[in-house]
Image (spheres, helix red, strand yellow):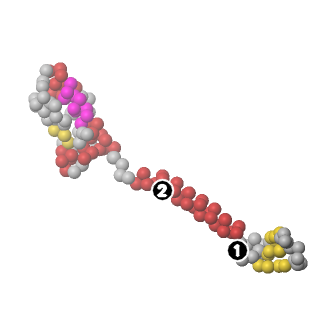
């Protein structure tokens, strides 16, 4: 039984193929060409593909959530105005002993809400018109009926 050992010699990593010297007990040294090609360059390619893949995943994780349509600040302002109007209406009803179904006007809730510079209740930033409505019902914005769900109290 002969025990063989193999030694790899490389002149250039990129341009010359691996030379395989085989030494065994029965014959002298033999020089053969390696069939496997350059294993190091295959590994380098896999490393670069892995790095590019990780960069792609990171970019995807950061960019995709930012592509979703965000709620515009003016839509948030409309909802906040509706909440303030609703709170003022409920406070007016509580202080004046009003029950559900009683109609509330803008003049009724003005003392219970912060007014704008003109002395009016805050308006919809996108030009909608608020309807105060009855006690027990939420106030509405006219844009909510035109397909803008963000102009409606949840």
Q: Residue 11, can we see it?
A: no
| Percent coordinates x, y for residue 132 in the rendering | 16, 35
From the image, state whether disc 2 or disc 1 is nearer to you: 1
Q: Can residue 6 be seen in this view?
A: yes
Q: Which of the 4 image quarters holds residue 113?
A: top left
Residue 11 quadrant: bottom right
Per the image, label 1 sits on a secondary structure element best described as loop
Give residue 73's mark. none
| Residue located at (79% from left, 75% from top) | 19
Instruction: Say whether marks 2 and 1 touch (CB < 8 Å).
Output: no
Query: Which residue: 19% across, 40% down?
Result: 140
What segment carries the magenta color?
82-91
Q: Where is residue 20 in the image (x, y as percent from the top left)?
A: 80, 74
The percent position of residue 30, horizontal first and vertical second, equals 84, 79
Residue beneath label 1, please?
Answer: 36
- Residue 102 is situated, as x and y percent measured from the top left of the image, at 10, 29
Q: Which residue is drawn at 52% across and 54% down?
A: 58
Side (left or right) of 27 relative to 112: right
102, above or below 26, in the image? above
Distance from Cα at disc 2 to Cα at disc 1: 36 Å
Q: Mark 2 points at which residue?
A: 60
35 magenta-colored: no
> For residue 45, which quarter of the picture?
bottom right
Q: How crowded is mark 2: few (under 14 residues within 10 Å), some or many (20 or more)?
A: few
What residue appears at the point 13 percent right and 33 percent down from the top-left corner? 134
């Amino acid at each position: 039984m002969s025990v063989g050992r193999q030694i790899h010699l490389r002149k250039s990593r990129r341009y010359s193929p691996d030379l395989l010297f085989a030494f065994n007990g029965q014959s002298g040294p033999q020089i053969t060409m390696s069939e496997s090609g350059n294993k190091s360059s295959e590994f380098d390619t896999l490393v670069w593909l892995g790095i590019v893949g990780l960069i792609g995943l990171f970019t995807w994780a950061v960019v995709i959530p930012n592509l979703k349509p965000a709620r515009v600040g003016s839509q948030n302002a409309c909802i906040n105005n509706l909440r303030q109007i609703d709170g003022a209406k409920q406070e007016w009803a509580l202080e004046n002993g009003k029950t559900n179904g009683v109609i509330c006007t803008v003049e009724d809730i003005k003392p219970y809400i912060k007014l704008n510079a003109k002395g009016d209740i805050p308006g919809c930033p996108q030009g909608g018109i608020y309807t105060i409505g009855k006690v027990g019902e939420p106030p509405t914005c006219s844009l909510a009926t035109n397909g803008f769900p963000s102009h409606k109290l949840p």
